[in-house]
Image (cartoon, rainbow, N blue to C red):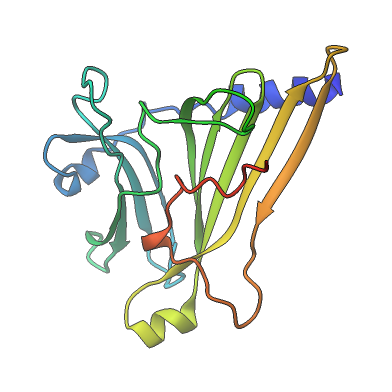
Amino acid sequence: MKYYFTLFCYFFLITLPIFAQDNAEFASYVLPDYEITNANKGDINSDGIIDAVLVLKHKTEETSKQPTLRPVLILIGQKNKKYVVALRQDKLILCKACNASANPKEPAAKVEFNELIVEKGQFSFNFYGGKKAKWSRILIFKFDAAASKTAKKDTWFLHTDTMERMEQLPNLDFTTKTLVKGPPKPNSVKSDFKDYDSKVTWFIKK
């Protein structure tokens, strides 16, 4: 189990966000009083044109006494190499002051947004947190061509919401438990990205 703990720590070290990238091309799309905390590009609607996903934070986030939103913006690429803001999502990225727990017996701890990954036809968000019970959480959303055609707008549904919880045992060893929501069953109601609320802690098991 010590191997898993080492792997767990290594995973977080290599996935710490790097914000040195040049995000000047997205400046005109950023909301007033917000700034980019993470951005990535890729063909998220599988049309052969590069799109972008932005995660924003309020400029007063570090000093505000009240939680501030961390909106996600979906930018759809155009043939003229510009973007159109297709969607804004305010319920996915937990704010810096928000707390959550992977264990109902343990006090909630600060949640960290860790990484944004963009691939062809999908994008994902990675979080981690915890005190004694460490945890990581990955939400993956995939583009649905059929639903997009019916709705006449690009649509992404939850593919998986996966949480891995690691707890220390009395003998100082560690145990891990993985909880997964999705993928959706055929003919079931799918979780639309635009409405998905990550604050609904389905993964807490009493």
Q: Quadrant of residue 183?
A: bottom right
Q: Residue at x 42, y 73 (%)?
A: 47
Give how far across and how far down residue 106 sits, in percent: 61, 24
63 relative to 14, above or below:
above
Q: Residue at x 23, y 20 (%)?
A: 65
Q: Residue at x 16, y 44 (%)?
A: 31
* Residue in the foreground of this view, choosing between 1 and 202: 202
Q: Which residue, as the protein is rendered here, is positioned at the far left?
A: 32
Q: Residue at x 22, y 17 (%)?
A: 63
Q: Which residue, as the protein is rendered here, is positioned at the far bottom?
A: 150
* Residue in the foreground of this view, choosing between 88 and 187: 187
192 relative to 21, above or below:
below
Q: Quadrant of residue 70?
A: top left
* Residue in the foreground of this view, choosing between 39 and 73: 73
Give how far across and how far down residue 173 sits, in percent: 85, 17
Give how far across and how far down residue 117 sits, in percent: 50, 46
The answer to whether residue 99 is left or right of residue 9 is left
The answer to whether residue 176 is left or right of residue 73 is right
Q: Split into 4 quadrants, where in the image is the C terminus?
A: top right
Q: Split into 4 quadrants, where in the image is the N terminus?
A: top right
Q: Quadrant of residue 137?
A: top right
Q: How many marks?
A: 0
14 relative to 33, above or below:
above
Give how far across and how far down residue 4 sits, in percent: 80, 26
93 relative to 101, above or below:
below
* Residue in the foreground of this view, choosing between 16 and 107: 107
